[in-house]
Image: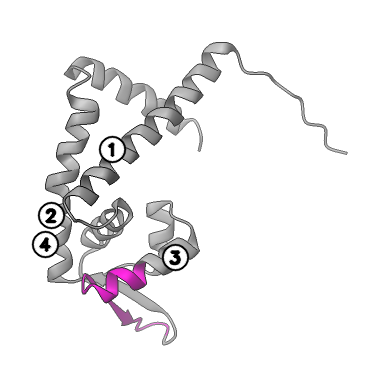
Amino acid sequence: MYIVKMIKPNDATVQVWTRLLRLNKIALKRVEGILKKEKLPALSWYDILLELERAGAEGLRPYELEEVTLLPQYGVSRILEKIEKAGYLQRLTCDDDGRGQSVVITDAGLKMRQKMWSVYSAAIEEVVGTNLNEAEAATLSGLLKDLISKQS
């Protein structure tokens, strides 16, 4: 029988958790609102287009996109269909697996990703850059990096 020891986090830990979640919600809502106002696709499209751009001509398999974007499998499938319909990606049959597909970004997709970045980067600056000086941002970035690395 496996017994789980219940450990209650201290108040500071709960505050960090709550504030990270709240900031995430605020930041994503702001970015999504700005993209929508500019009549651009959702942030999830940006994430997929960015990863496809990084992958180059070989592209990525849908399950690889799921891993690098942290989107659920059903979400990736649905979004890929919409992005493909818009002409920003193309599906190719994998040479090593006739049933498998690789997804690659199109020239139109590259242009859309760049257009989205100009708006997205401004939103990042508005949410973070204008509220933290460079030293504060570096300190927070280091703390978050350490916290992430300890989760592996």
Label 1 CA crowd tier, 10 Å (few <14, some 14–19, many 20+): some
Residues at discs 3 and 1 in contact (Cβ within 8 Å): no
| Residue 9, placed above or below residue 55 | above
User: In this figure, which residue is indicated by the disc labeled 1?
Assistant: 30
Check the image and tell me how it is coloured: one colour
Along the line of sight, the residue nearer the viewer: 145 or 75:
75
Point out the stretch of residues depicted in magenta: 80-97
Label 4 CA crowd tier, 10 Å (few <14, some 14–19, many 20+): few
Indicate the position of residue 16 as horizontal and vertical percent values: 47, 20
Residue type of the residue flagged with mark 3:
Tyr
Q: Residue furthest front?
A: 37
The answer to whether residue 109 is magenta is no
Residue type of the residue flagged with mark 1:
Arg
The CA span between labels 3 and 1 is: 29 Å
Label 2 CA crowd tier, 10 Å (few <14, some 14–19, many 20+): some
Indicate the position of residue 120 as horizontal and vertical percent values: 19, 44
User: In this figure, which residue is indicated by the disc labeled 4?
Assistant: 111
User: Of marks 3 and 4, which one's residue comes earlier in the chain?
Assistant: 3
Q: Residue at x 41, y 63 (%)?
A: 76
Q: Residue at x 25, y 58 (%)?
A: 41
Q: Residue at x 30, y 81 (%)?
A: 92
Residues at discs 2 and 1 in contact (Cβ within 8 Å): no
Q: Residue furthest bottom?
A: 98
Along the line of sight, the residue nearer the viewer: 113 or 92:
113
Nearer to us: label 2 or label 1: 1
User: Of marks 1 and 4, which one's residue comes earlier in the chain?
Assistant: 1
| Residue 122, placed above or below residue 58 | above
Where disc 2 sits, the SS reads helix
The CA span between labels 2 and 1 is: 19 Å
